[in-house]
Image (cartoon, rainbow, N blue to C red):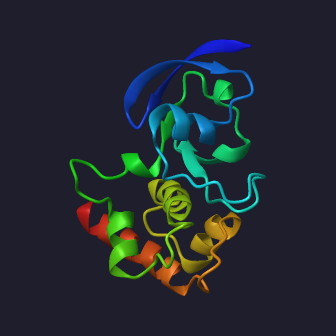
Amino acid sequence: MKRIISLRLNGKPVEDAVSDNTLLIDYLRDNHQLTGAKKGCDGGECGACSVLVNGRPRLSCITLTASCQGNDIETIEGQAKNGILSALQRAFHENLGAQCGFCTPGMIMVAESLLRRNVNPDENEIRQVLGGNLCRCTGYVKIIKSVRAAARMMETVS
């Protein structure tokens, strides 16, 4: 069965007909060509598909699109504004936080949620929030360094 859903996607209102069983990751990728969220495990275990729903991290590979009715969805594609990278995107680039890059969009989205709540998290808070996001390339040192660098950038702006 299909239903009409209305939501905000990266700040823009959208309305689409979706099947009741359409996963959010498929909706984003197939309906809106937003391919930043990656299909890693297809079971909610790796975090590569993380997006923000009403500012909170959500695993799009286990979220039904219909459950997002009326919500605000943010993807990695919505983080840069007017072609300018967000503080986290810039910090990941400058601090080599991305190795192969597969997990990076999910890492950035989860870290974005943290930094919106706490602009100055300590290393343990960063590790805890990133605990559900797996990186197969690195020991997380540069990822944590990137989040801390973004926090410093955001602190100087506020």
Image quadrant containing the N terminus: top right
Image coordinates of residue 13 in percent, x first then y, are: 40, 23
Image coordinates of residue 91 in percent, x first then y, are: 36, 73
**135 vs 133: above or below:** below
Please tell me which residue lies in front, 134 or 52: 134
Residue 63 as seen in the image, left or right of residue 5: right
Image coordinates of residue 35 in percent, x first then y, are: 49, 49
> Within the image, what quadrant is residue 30 found in?
top right
Image coordinates of residue 72 in percent, x first then y, are: 49, 32
Please tell me which residue lies in front, 55 or 27: 27
Residue at 54% x, 45% y: name it: 52
Residue 66 in view here? yes
> Within the image, what quadrant is residue 68 found in?
top right
Residue 109 as seen in the image, left or right of residue 42: left
Residue 54 in view here? no
> Within the image, what quadrant is residue 71 found in?
top right
Residue at 51% x, 56% y: name it: 109
**126 vs 71: above or below:** below
Please tell me which residue lies in front, 55 or 141: 141
**56 vs 65: above or below:** below
Image quadrant containing the C terminus: bottom left
Tally of marks: 0
Residue 8 as seen in the image, left or right of residue 53: left
